[in-house]
Amino acid sequence: MPQVGPRSAGSNPGPVCYGNGGTELTVTDCNLTLGYLNENSIAGGEMQLDRAAAVATCDTQLAGPLGKAPEEAAHGVFTLSCMTMIQAIRAVTTERGQDPRDFAVFAFGGNGPLFAAGIAETLGCGKVIVPPAPGVFSALGLLCAEIEIHKSRSFRRLLDGAAVKDAQAALAEMAVLAEAEAQRSGGRLTATARMRYAGQSSDLLVPLGDPAQLTEAAMRAVFTAEHDAVFKFTAPETEPVRITAIELCYALPVGRLDPNRRRLARGALGKRMGVRGGRHAAAIDGFSMPGRPPPQ
């Protein structure tokens, strides 16, 4: 029975079509066999793929034993790949009370956009979003994502006015600790709480926003909405709500990306990478780090 993943060929040796010594059939080889990849235009034209090797490997390792043509077998692998991703999406939508039809499919990764349309059609999603340079989207996210420091504390109380005030005091203490750890002021504070109806055995992680703005009514309203979204029911207003833990996120901006400057000058990144104060500092065309000038 053919199986897709979870083991990967990685980038070295990579798929057979890379010509780096890979010998096992990969999803990329199958996509190339199907003509879904341009064999002459990978990495800006700096790399060529060997379609003949991909087809031959598909024929030897998969199509031949199944009695299928290479393209038919490769399409089966493509379909299996789609279903694997669809199952992962359902695990964080349908199985958590969310309708995937209410969302767009966000297609990133080197091969992500190849599968997006089929996934969206199967799930009933009406929109597919493909970011610029999807193959390096995660790397760009690493550059631009905020630094976050998380603090948590056990807080076993029934929800009432006094509990809210005590929670705010505890969150303020946690904010001081987070700021000291960050060694930088001005972070954005966001609170969450683990909450349940009294008598329940499991918690919901409930986003609360700015801890300074917490009220009993607001916390109950957010919890009720989250409970309804996940479990599709809510208890009467008189039902006690229990808090079991509070959490604080202290977030600091790191960088800004100019979407109008998307191409690196050849060799620029290597020339402008350095280490300062034990931390890596980088300057990239179109990207700046506030308060951190690029190394000279």
Image (cartoon, rainbow, N blue to C red):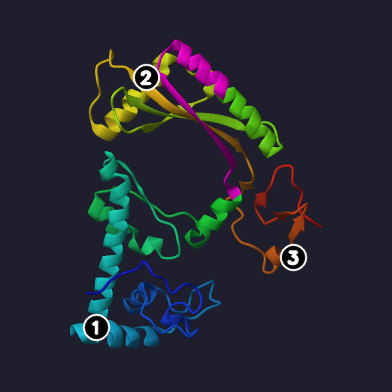
- Residue underneath mark 3: 271
The numbered mark, 3 or 2, whose residue comes first in the sequence reads 2
Asked whether disc 3 touches disc 1, contact meaning CB atoms under 8 Å apart, the reply is no
What is the secondary structure assignment of the residue under circle 2?
Answer: helix
For the point 27% across and 28% down, which residue is it? 228
Front of the two marks 3 and 1: 1
- Residue underneath mark 2: 220
Horizontal relation, residue 211 to residue 9: left or right: right
Magenta residue check for 160: yes
Disc 3 versus disc 2: distance between alpha carbons? Answer: 54 Å
Q: Amino acid at mark 2?
A: Arg
Local crowd size for mark 2, using a 10 Å CA cut-off: few (<14), some (14–19), many (≥20) = some
Horizontal relation, residue 234 to residue 276: left or right: left
Q: Position of residue 229 (x, y in %)?
A: 29, 32
| In this view, 3 is above or below 101 | below
Q: Which mark is residue 63?
A: 1
Magenta residue check for 39: no
The quadrant where residue 227 appears: top left
